[in-house]
Image (cartoon, rainbow, N blue to C red):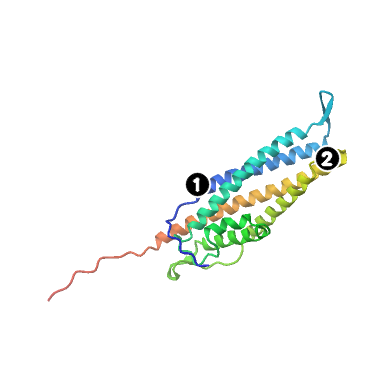
Amino acid sequence: MNQNFSEPYRSPRTLSLLAIGFLAALLAIDALFVILSGGQLLFPFDLDLDGEPMQFWILPIGLLSILEFVVFIGCVVFFLLWLYRCYKNLGALKSGSPEYTPGWAIGWWFIPFANLIKPLGVVRDLWNESDPDFDPELNFLSNSVGTPALLGWWWAFWLLSNFSANISGRLSDVESAEGLRTLSIALIIASLFGIVAAALAILVVKNITKRQEARFSRMGDFQPQFAPPPPPQFG
């Protein structure tokens, strides 16, 4: 799909830093989930609150779940804002032929079933069209194709973290010791997947931002320089 975006280039660096900040916070929260769930698994004991027993780890895990939800919303918002900004830059970066419009680059994330595959294609397309190693004689067309391993691993762990989080959520209503043990293991697995997914997402954001800035910088290096014509010669 050949797009002709007329907007000037706007650096995605600020949005990338915000997205990375929230992703780093999400990674830290998942690390705390591993610690608390491990504590619940290895050292289970009850608190006596007004004659009612309550599992000690339930309260901190519950509070952390609320914080995780807030941070996750921040991740989604700033990651998609960053993604939209990068796609809007492709016209100014003389992109060859991006497959998606900026609107669909965001829209595919919210369409059921398609959002299991299409977002990876969106980010892969953005990666290739932001390639700084271009040939100015070919009108700055990108020469790179394919999917870097980083993108494939990021998407795989993103899906695994979401699937495992859904499973652990379905196990949250437990009353037996065995059920609590199963929940703890599920939370640890989901959190480990989440840590890897967040770390890889940070690398994706950093690398695409660097590629766009390097491409924009190289475009300036290849701007044609027009010299005034020589004065006419008489006689």
Q: Nearer the viewer, residue 172 or 16?
A: 172
In the image: residue 220, left or right of residue 128: left
Give the CA distance from mark 2 to mark 1: 43 Å
The quadrant in which the C terminus is found is bottom left
Q: For the residue carrying disc 2, how many other residues have a C-alpha within 10 Å: few (<14), some (14-19), or many (20+)? A: few
SS under mark 1: helix
Residue extending furthest toward the front: 111
The amino acid type, in three-letter code, at marker 1 is: Thr
Residue extending furthest toward the top: 50
Residue 169 is tagged as none
Residue on which the image places disc 1: 14
Q: Position of residue 166 (x, y in %)?
A: 74, 48
- Which quadrant of the figure has residue 223? bottom left
Contact (Cβ within 8 Å) of mark 2 with mark 1: no
Q: Position of residue 206 (x, y in %)?
A: 56, 52
Q: Nearer the viewer, residue 20 or 2?
A: 2
Q: Position of residue 109 (x, y in %)?
A: 62, 55
- Which quadrant of the figure has residue 154? bottom right
- Which quadrant of the figure has residue 92? bottom left
Q: Nearer the viewer, residue 119 or 114?
A: 114
The amino acid type, in three-letter code, at marker 2 is: Val
SS under mark 2: loop
Residue on which the image places disc 2: 174
In the image: residue 52, left or right of residue 11: right
In the image: residue 183, left or right of residue 81: right
